[in-house]
Image (tube, coloured by chain):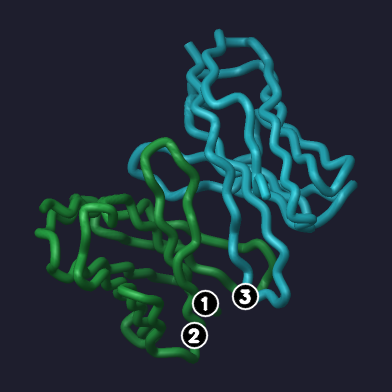
Chain colours: A green, B cyan
Amino acid sequence: SQKIEQNSEALNIQEGKTATLTCNYTNYSPAYLQWYRQDPGRGPVFLLLIRENEKEKRKERLKVTFDTTLKQSLFHITASQPADSATYLCVLGTDSWGKFQFGAGTQVVVTP
Amino acid sequence: NAGVTQTPKFRILKIGQSMTLQCTQDMNHNYMYWYRQDPGMGLKLIYYSVGAGITDKGEVPNGYNVSRSTTEDFPLRLELAAPSQTSVYFCASSYPRQATNEKLFFGSGTQLSVL
């Protein structure tokens, strides 16, 4: 069956360091992958999208890699700040409209 | 722009009661979705709609109904509430220019408890 795995344990990191989150998937061939941020009591907010033919995408302090051979995406937050504390969701998409698979998310806690 | 607006924010239901979760968007998006989020689980699709008058089931539709009479509104109806429907519900919308560029815009969620 299709499976998406994100670290269930919270990632505790010191301000200024780089946070790296992992998203692994099995039995799935996504056309693209997205990362969303979710704060407590709020809905997810879109951050980045990377397509299957792209290796890396950047947006400000965020970087995403996508390795379709390893079936893995890495999400990096460089120079992390306490305001980056949130849960980050990995979402796989196909070339069919509206077909998404969500990971359970990884909580990031950045301490001063 | 308000984006995607959900009401109510919180609700407690007794077993067997019914209610409607409201969702409206002002971005003229064709696609709208209802998801539920349970602790430690990824969001699960309940129902979705590709336009006014068109709806379809997602992964977990049992116990729910939807309608889409306008582009803006996509209410979710719970009939005969059960404890298994205790969850956080999110409405989302999208207007994909192409299938590989579809981003979701979410509402702030409805926390529902069925006791």
Residue nearest the observer in this picture, B55 or A56? A56
Q: Position of residue B2 (x, y in %)?
A: 66, 45
Looking at the image, is mark 2 or mark 3 nearer the viewer?
3
Label 2 sits on a secondary structure element that is loop
Q: Which corner quadrant of the image does residue A106 belong to?
A: bottom left
Looking at the image, is mark 1 or mark 3 nearer the viewer?
3
Confirm or deny contact between disc 1 and disc 3 (CB under 8 A): yes
For residue A79, above or below residue B62: below
User: Alpha carbon of mark 2 to alpha carbon of mark 1: how far?
Assistant: 5 Å
Please, which chain is the residue tagged with disc 3 on? B
Tell me the amino acid under the disc marked 1: Tyr
Q: Is residue A75 left or right of residue B42?
A: left
Tell me the amino acid under the disc marked 2: Glu
Q: Is residue A82 left or right of residue A3?
A: left
Tell me the amino acid under the disc marked 3: Asn
Q: Say if residue A72 shows up in the picture.
A: no
Confirm or deny contact between disc 2 and disc 1 (CB under 8 A): yes
Labels 2, 3: one chain: no
Q: Residue at x 31, y 71 (%)?
A: A75
Labels 1, 3: one chain: no
Q: Which residue is mark 3?
A: B101
Q: Residue at x 58, y 43 (%)?
A: B107
Q: Which residue is mark 2?
A: A52
Q: Is residue B88 left or right of residue B94?
A: left
Q: Which mark is residue A32?
A: 1
Please, which chain is the residue tagged with disc 2 on? A
Residue nearest the observer in this picture, A91 or B3? B3
Confirm or deny contact between disc 2 and disc 3 (CB under 8 A): no
Please, which chain is the residue tagged with disc 1 on? A
Which of the two labelled residues, at mark 2 and mark 1, occupies the earlier sequence position? 1
Q: Position of residue A86 (x, y in %)?
A: 31, 50
Q: Position of residue B75 (x, y in %)?
A: 74, 34
